[in-house]
Image (cartoon, rainbow, N blue to C red):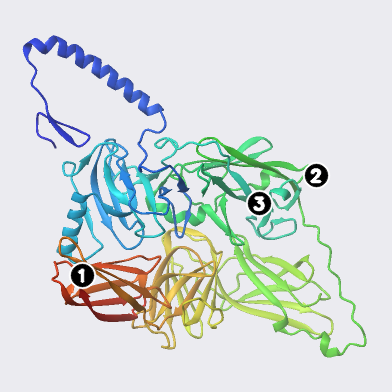
Amino acid sequence: MPAKGIVWWGGRKERMRPLRDADNWFSRSTLALLAFLSLFALAMTEVCAGTLEFPMTNDICPTSSFGSYRGGHLHGGMDFSTGGVTGVPVLAVDSCYVWRIKLWNGGYGKALYAQLPDGKVVVYGHLSRYRPELEARVEAEQDRLGFYEIEIYFGPGEFNFAPGDTLAFSGDTGSGPAHLHFEIRSGQGDHNKINPVPDYLDISENLSPVIEKIAIVPLSSQCAVNGVYGPVMLDRGQAADTLVVTHAHFGVSVAAIDHAQCGKVITPIVYEIRLEGHPYWRFHIDTFPFSESYLVGALYDVIEGKRYMRLFKEYDLDLSGFGDITGSQFWNPMSLGPRDEPYRLLVKAEDAWGNADSLEIPVRVVKSPGFDWPGVAEVDPAQAVDSLEVSEDDIEIETAVHSDGVVVMARPPRPPRSLPYAHIDEWGSVGFSGARLKPVGENLFRGVIAGSSPSGNPVVNLEVSFDFGETKTTKSKSMVVGIAGRGHGFTFSGKRFEVELLPPEEDLPRTLIEVKEDSTGVYERFESVAGRVLLEPNGVFLHKGLKFRVRDLKGQVSAKHGVYADRDGWPVYLGRFNSAGVCEIRLRRLENLVILEDIEPPEITSIGRFRRRSDGKATFTARVADAGSGAAAGSIKGFVDGDTAIVSIDPDTARITGRSRKPLKYGKHTIRLEAEDRLGNLAVKEVVLDLSR
């Protein structure tokens, strides 16, 4: 707290002059007037938008919106262009003090956290350097600890600033190219992210968003859209065509973009569905809890490589802290009901300033898809009998799970003489019934096998029988299916791997697991694929997470193997195997896993640019290349003449930047770098460089 008789305003200290007796009447009147004006100004501040200064000196150009998609999390702020350069002054948006400084190789890179008078915290990310007195404190702490990645906290009286004061300079540290990340938080510690627009930053414009595509997503095993039991995408030209929906339990996802005034593409923040002209669903992304940012995949879909915002919820997810959500939790099939006249469904996307775009879709709801029996193919008697035989390998089988059972899709090479029959045999008990598969397309059959999953032995055997007249063929598939509720985890042992699920306290949706132990598939930068764990339903979120334990049964997996999530064909690291051949991970999102091997160490190159600064300390640069699991995400160590150096790495470019902790004399010095990737592959390179004038 400041000393008595000192007032703090914008970081400046001024001693208050004691009042004389002759001043009392005038002073009381003046103070009363000032109090009234202060209350009036406060009231006006609460209703006016744009209460903060803009955080940079250059032109306003947003490049990424609040709440937009990021890999594994929601974007917690806004990004602003720096014109592709570094060094643009970054300004205080209000009276504030610097509360925290954090430097790390990933994420926000060099970041500054400032506390505002109302308790909110603003964050500036990807900085190149801080103002001189802050930069000196950072380097002193790095030299003391011997690490680049540090975190410093400050009190209210140490570094105070007024609106418009320069706090730092923009850069490209952490993830991404040169830009400024600007963020508003509700406070320190556990907090909510807050959208800076339109209430805090006035960057209004009059350009409307554009809805590019709409996806209709079936949410039950019986729902089909235009005869398709999966997402159906519509572009603007197809939106006016009437959709035919069977058992109308479906959700709507929308792909929309918004153009900033400077031409950059960002995303809308308000989405709405209207049914027959009445509001049905509205989602305004103006805040979300920091602790639940991982639910990004519950708000966004990726369908055929394109990203969509979901306008529906699944599996009772609590999204109460995610802005303003109003409407039905599910798209209720009973509320519509079959009728010949199409329902009018309007989808709307809106930006922060009320500019909007909308599309209206006619939807006709029917009871059944109306597919005809595909019939039996005519066979030329001259054909050999062998050509009529159908083996198990000729039949394609796909399985998925919904809350009401296991969905089976079968595609034989030619039509059978009768409807295929599918049934599940549990190994040890009986809990599933059989089902005739119905035609849903040419040589395509579908059905749902209802039943409860076992609590003890979840391994089941699916059999689908086909009668082709001349031959009768059965397609078999072993799989794991079950409800992993409280205390009902289960283990599936394959030939090479064992997968154990340890569930959280709350019940889980029905889960299907398939373990593939082949080495098919190619992942860039990795040596080989050792196996896969396929999960259904893929993409379901769990608040507390599901613990997996993957165990090597044959002793063929080493510490050079890791478990990765397969996200759209791109592996995302989750964990590595220990010396006992066990890898434990926790998933908050059910997604397919892949076991990958990486045995190649990183490669350190181009150590150079050895220069002496004005304070006598020397800087140098290098690069690291990794053909496998990413040295940029592992650890980097540096030494100058045996003394620990301060070393950072850009995770995007794999460029290493280092400096000595002590002043160096001109002459020859030894630089040593050690780069280790996530799976423990280590590279070491040592060079002698001449520090010349």
Structural distance between the alpha carbons of marks 1 and 3: 60 Å
> Is residue 326 shown left or right of residue 334?
left
Residue occupied by mark 1: 645
Which quadrant of the rendered structure holds the C terminus?
Answer: bottom left
Task: Determine the residue positioned at 35% across, 36% down.
Answer: 53
Q: Position of residue 440 (x, y in %)?
A: 76, 64
Q: Position of residue 338 (x, y in %)?
A: 75, 46
Q: Nearer the viewer, residue 692 or 151?
A: 692
Residue occupied by mark 3: 249
Please report contact status of discs 2 and 3: CB closer than 8 Å, yes or no.
Answer: no
Q: Nearer the viewer, residue 137 or 198?
A: 137
Whether residue 152 is visible, yes or no, is: yes
Which of the 4 image quadrants contains residue 478? bottom right
Secondary structure beneath disc 1?
loop
Structural distance between the alpha carbons of marks 2 and 1: 75 Å
Q: Position of residue 199 (x, y in %)?
A: 42, 35
**Which comes before the other along the chain, label 2 or label 3?**
3
Question: Looking at the picture, does residue 465 appear above or below residue 286?
Answer: below
Residue occupied by mark 2: 340
**Which comes before the other along the chain, label 1 or label 3?**
3
> Is residue 8 shown left or right of residue 440?
left
